[in-house]
Amino acid sequence: MSLQRLCVLGATGSIGASTLDVVARHPERYRIFALSGHRRLNELADLCRRFQPVYAAVPDQASADCLAGLLRGAEMLPEILVGEGGLEAIAAHPQVDTVMAAIVGAAGLKPTLAAVKAGKRVLLANKEALVMSGALFIEAVQASGATLLPIDSEHNAIFQCLADPATPGLARKGVRRILLTASGGPFRETPAEQLVEVTPDQACAHPKWSMGRKISVDSATLMNKGLELIEACWLFEATPEQVEVVIHPQSVIHSLVDYVDGSVLAQLGNPDMRTPIAHALAWPERIDSGVTALDLFEIGRLEFERPDEARFPCLRLAREAAQAGGCMPATLNAANEVAVEAFLAGQLGFTEIPQLIESVLKGVEPGPAADLDAVFAADNTARQLAREWLARR
Ligand code: NAD
Ligand code: MG
């Protein structure tokens, strides 16, 4: 077994921490070659001391100076790279085998694409990158021969339930549809009139998963499921109509695949991201992830319900953006990022998040995502429209 050299983009986040937890269990298999962190430099310094990467990437020179100061006297000092160029350099470094793409939001697109273009084994947590660039991303995977493995628990589950992931097209695999499960978030049972009062801390207190704040808010609005619907379309060559969202409050089934012969395959497990991370790290082998065995007697029952799109319009908005195609998913994603940031800063109400996004989507002409410039132009326009909406209201 050869040692895999890893680059972890977003090492100081929730997925980054789970990744490093799994990696630390298998020192004979994995070596941390490069780490990136954005603002939590103390945590990044701790990780550098512990994993001794050859490179560390930070946003700017001031952060680099700060990290160097924090690492003074350390046994092994990483070479510190700065800016987006630094992230792209570590993601595409010739000595890196596997890249964990775990930066949150649009900021992860260019470094993730750099890993794809360099033909790496890419473990994709950063769903926003794929949502924004869609066909361009998948074409880049095909052109470079990169191995793309989904980390999102639902997509990892679907990947595991597809008999032959390499056969192109759902129809040729004998798949009727994909059933994408959702916990329903912390407000699954909250009446519409109470959603107006929801605070950022309430929205970030997810009943089943512990995650970064942005994805926690997305889970509460169901935009996370909307982004995941778009993600599933690209990963598995599905149409939006072939992906059905199923609310499953126990979060034990991570998604299902419905075949034409009536067989429905599901992947189950305790809700812990170390399972999909370990799966993707070792695929096609299996390794210990540290996750406890599922106790079905403890769980007792599994429930399912339809999503309520009247209380959670983000799901509808995402499906419409998927159907419109082109740059619309990039517009949706950018408007959502601005809305979530404003909500977390206390500048926007919870129920105003979909209002802002819908207004931005209505304010743009759908255009093709011909190249990355078009995608970033759509992203820019959406952010500008979203800020104008915030200023106006
Ligand atoms: P997080 O907020 O905990 O961590 C985000 C990481 O990205 C941090 O290391 C941060 O330093 C870095 N980062 C933030 N802004 C950056 C920028 N502008 N430039 C460079 N780096 C930046 O988020 P998370 O929960 O770990 O989620 C990471 C990604 O994984 C997201 O796309 C999320 O949707 C996806 N994901 C997360 C989970 C989960 O359980 N946390 C599950 C599925 C998918
Ligand atoms: Mg998910």
Image: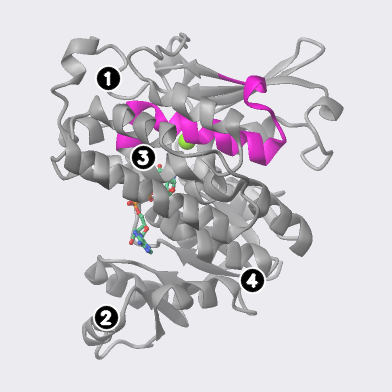
Q: Which residue is mark 3?
A: 336
User: Would you place residue 55 above or below residue 201 in this image?
Assistant: below
Q: CA distance from mark 1 to mark 2?
A: 40 Å
Q: Give the distance between the C-alpha atoms of the residues marked 2 and 4, in whole angstroms.
A: 28 Å
The kind of residue tagged 4 is Leu
Looking at the rendered image, the disc whose residue lies closer to the viewer, 2 or 4, is: 2
Q: State which mark lies toward you, 2 or 3.
A: 3
Give the residue number, with chain letter if any, for mark 2: 67
Which badge, 4 or 3, comes first in the chain's sequence?
A: 4
x, y percent for residue 175: 77, 22
In the image, what residue occupies the spot 73% across and 54% down? 139
Badge 1 crowding class, 10 Å Cα cut-off, few under 14, some 14 to 19, many 20 or more, is: many
Work out how far the residue at label 2 is from the one at label 3, CA to CA, in angstroms.
32 Å
Q: Nearer the viewer, residue 299 or 164?
A: 164
Labels 1 and 4: the sequence-earlier one: 4
- Label 4 and label 3: CA atoms lie apart by 39 Å
Tell me where the magenta segment starts and ends, as one range.
Answer: 217-244
- Disc 1 residue type (three-letter): Phe
Q: Which residue is mark 1?
A: 187
The answer to whether marks 2 and 3 mark residues whose Cβ atoms lie closer than 8 Å is no
- Whether residue 19 sits left or right of residue 267 in the image: it is left
**Does the image show residue 94?**
yes
Gap between marks 1 and 3, in whole Å? 18 Å
The residue drawn where x is 40% and y is 17% is 249
Q: Nearer the viewer, residue 175 or 14?
A: 175
